Amino acid sequence: MSSQTLVLPPSLPWAVLEAVLHGFRRHALLYGFAGIVMVADLSEAWVLDLPFDFQMVKLFTGPVLLILAVMILLGLVGEIIRHARSGNTGSVTLALWHKLRDDYLAPMRVSNAVHAFLFMSAYMVGYTFIKKAIPAAHPFSWDGSFAQWDQAVHFGAQPYTWLSFLNVPLVTFILNVNYNIWFFVMFTLWFWQGFSGQDSRLRLHFLLGFTLTWFLGTCVLGTVFSSVGPCFYGRLLTGSDPYAPAMAWLATANQTYPIWSLNVMNELWKTYETGTGLVNGISAMPSMHVGTSVLFAVLGFASGKRWLGLLLSAFAAMIFLGSVHLAWHYAIDGYAGALIAIAGWKLAGRLIDWARPELRAN
């Protein structure tokens, strides 16, 4: 094997640079929206006289780079397996090099990766600040009303009581594991579209719909309907706590299996009281765990992979059950989150048709 076969073509770096530069125009809609969120962030920081915080951006950067490395490694392992199964007697090293050169280092993929990362990092600066500032902008005040509405909508009983059949330690543990898996699913789908090698409408639709859903759900409605959720009801409001039995069950289940939500709840409340800590930003209405999970299912069906849409729909249903059973959310938080996700997806589609009509047939 000639050593020249492992040398990058001289034209590739320039092709990548050209694709990255052209990528700013292709991603103008995403950068424009991130800019709007940043302006809202800076305005709120000025009005409320709050310091800027980049901690959550650091938390975003680390997992993104780690998952990217893992995905590339898995891709290369997959290429080795494919090469072995094909019966090809050629060099495995050369096959891996071609995979890197022609796929992972392809100009369009590198450009998409750069802009997905830059746009999302800019967006995260604004989003995380606005979420953390919710109690300063609008002190928590809706929990009493949401508790009453939740009971009224569910035939006079709190929704968690309808789910009492789930009060089995192993079931509670599984729902908690699934709730945590949400982070992995979110990052995986974001990578799938964000680092795609194609300039597709589906990719742009998901990235814009994803961030629009978060912004409308948390930054706008989360601020207007400022609330802490069932798990913190007794810590915020005086008097009888209708969610004490739900929290008591979680403590009981925790004696058999680790219910990690309890530790996260304690950290969130500690950060709320002290104003310091990495785990921050309490916001119950609407549920963005449920909202984004519904958006994931929409993406699955929109991609033409019916099996994926069905799988992600089941995942969204389990996230909804977990959000109520684990006392993170009122059930109406989940209903609202699902509606916001659909609205965010539809609004993203309309904006793309306006800004990039050439992608309609893509």
Image (cartoon, rainbow, N blue to C red):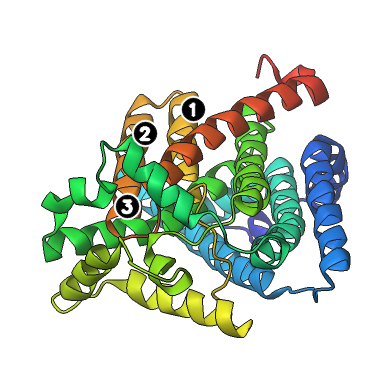
Residue drawn at the location 64% of the way across and 58% of the way down: 6
Q: Please say if the residues under marks 1 and 2 sit with CB atoms less than 8 Å apart.
A: yes
The answer to whether the residues at label 3 and label 1 have Cβ atoms under 8 Å apart is: no
Percent position of residue 204, x then y: 67, 34
Amino acid type assigned to the residue bearing label 1 in the image: Ser
Which numbered disc flags the more N-terminal residue, 3 or 2? Answer: 2
> Of helix, strand and loop, which one carries label 2?
helix
Q: Is residue 277 left or right of residue 87?
A: right
What residue does disc 1 label?
A: 303
Residue 349 showing in the rendered view? yes
Seen in the picture, residue 236 relative to 360 is either above or below; the reply is below
Residue tagged by mark 3? Answer: 324
Which residue is disc 2 drawn over?
A: 308
- Label 3 and label 1: CA atoms lie apart by 30 Å
Along the viewing direction, whichever of 275 and 141 lies nearer the viewer: 141
Q: Nearer the viewer, mark 3 or mark 2?
A: 3
Q: Three-letter amino acid code at disc 3?
A: Val
